[in-house]
Image: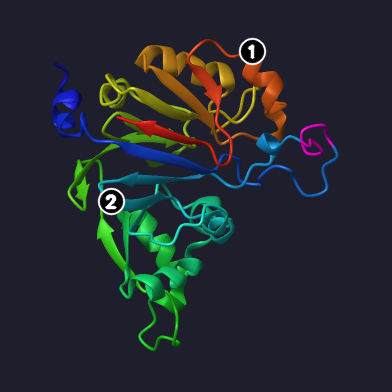
């Protein structure tokens, strides 16, 4: 049995629910001012908020990334409780909605547990300096920062395996939780990191568009990566309007692969 599979064997009989809160790139879809067919599409699957997912496991709600659409996503999915947030990296489309965690501070009557690398924490301190001020304004978000790196860690007893990926020259993190692997904003993943993915049943991987891009996988590159990992099901996320219409692109994909869309929910065992 592969080492990564051994490490997560405690999850084999546990159910995990994944909700795609957003599946769009940094500008979202539609793009402001754009009149292309995708941006004018009436198909709700072509309306994409900034990329984030909600994971429900062991009675806990864990968010991966809190971008500028965080508030809208939480309202749309009627998320009344949020227990922790894990950040992949510090770009604005992944951290820009953190101020709205205040609502969960009030609902939970406790600080929000935040899991992030030291570099990402430094960015949070810069972006939200008022949160970390010695003289805090009443009602600012309450955060409890936890350091993570490339070593496996636990959130409420849930084992999470970080996967180091490259976003152009920026090292960021994907995550494996049981039979789910979630990777966004990648354009290179080393072989030793791929080894952590083998045996996963559900893979979420980014693909910005069909044409080459400096910091994101293309659709063909994402498909090739998925083939190398051999999951049962692959979901493509972090899509730009250049990818094309959801219905048309989805028909072109091989068996076991589909475009994710906002609001899509999947059960993983």
What stretch of residues is rendered in magenta? Answer: 36-42
Residue 83, horizontal then vertical, whole percent? 33, 59
Q: Secondary structure at mark 2?
A: loop
**Residue 147 to residue 175: above or below:** below
Please tell me which residue is depicted at 58% across the width and 41% down the height of the picture. 262
Q: Report whether residue 183 is seen.
A: no
Please tell me which residue is depicted at 67% across the width and 27% down the height of the picture. 246
Left or right of 243 in this view: 77: left
**Residue at which label 1 appears:** 252
**Residue at which label 2 appears:** 59
- Locate the N terminus and report the quarter of the image it occupies: top left
Please tell me which residue is depicted at 38% across the width and 39% down the height of the picture. 17
Would you call the spot at circle 2 few (<14 residues within 10 Å), some (14-19), or many (20 or more)?
few
Residue 87, horizontal then vertical, whole percent? 39, 51
- Locate the C terminus and report the quarter of the image it occupies: top left
Left or right of 71 in this view: 105: left
**Residue 174 to residue 211: above or below:** below
Q: Secondary structure at mark 1?
A: helix
User: Which badge, 1 or 2, comes first in the chain's sequence?
Assistant: 2
Residue 200, horizontal then vertical, whole percent? 30, 23
């Amino acid at each position: 049995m592969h080492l990564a599979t051994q490490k997560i064997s405690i999850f084999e009989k546990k159910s995990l629910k994944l909700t795609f809160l957003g599946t769009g790139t940094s500008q979202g879809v539609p793009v402001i001012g754009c009149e292309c067919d995708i941006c004018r599409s009436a198909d709700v699957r072509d309306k994409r908020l900034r990329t984030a997912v909600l994971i429900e496991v062991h009675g806990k709600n864990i968010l991966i990334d809190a971008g500028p659409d965080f508030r809208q996503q939480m309202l749309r999915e009627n998320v009344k409780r949020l227990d922790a947030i894990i950040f992949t990296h510090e770009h604005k489309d992944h951290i820009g909605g953190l101020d709205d965690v205040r609502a969960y501070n009030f609902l939970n009557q406790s600080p929000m547990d935040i899991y992030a690398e030291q570099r990402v924490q430094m960015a949070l301190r810069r972006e939200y300096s008022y949160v970390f001020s010695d003289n805090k304004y009443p009602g600012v978000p309450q955060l409890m920062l936890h350091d993570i790196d490339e070593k496996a860690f636990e959130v409420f007893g849930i084992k999470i395996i970080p996967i180091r990926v490259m976003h152009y020259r920026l090292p960021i993190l994907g995550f494996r939780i049981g039979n789910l692997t979630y990777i966004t904003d990648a354009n290179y993943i080393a072989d030793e990191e791929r080894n952590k993915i083998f045996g996963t049943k559900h893979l979420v991987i980014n693909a910005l568009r069909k044409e080459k891009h400096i910091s994101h996988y293309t659709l063909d590159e994402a498909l090739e990566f998925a083939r190398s990992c051999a999951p049962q099901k692959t979901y493509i996320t972090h899509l730009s309007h250049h990818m094309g219409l959801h219905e048309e692109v989805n028909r072109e994909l091989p068996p076991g692969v589909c475009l994710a869309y906002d609001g899509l929910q999947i059960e993983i065992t």
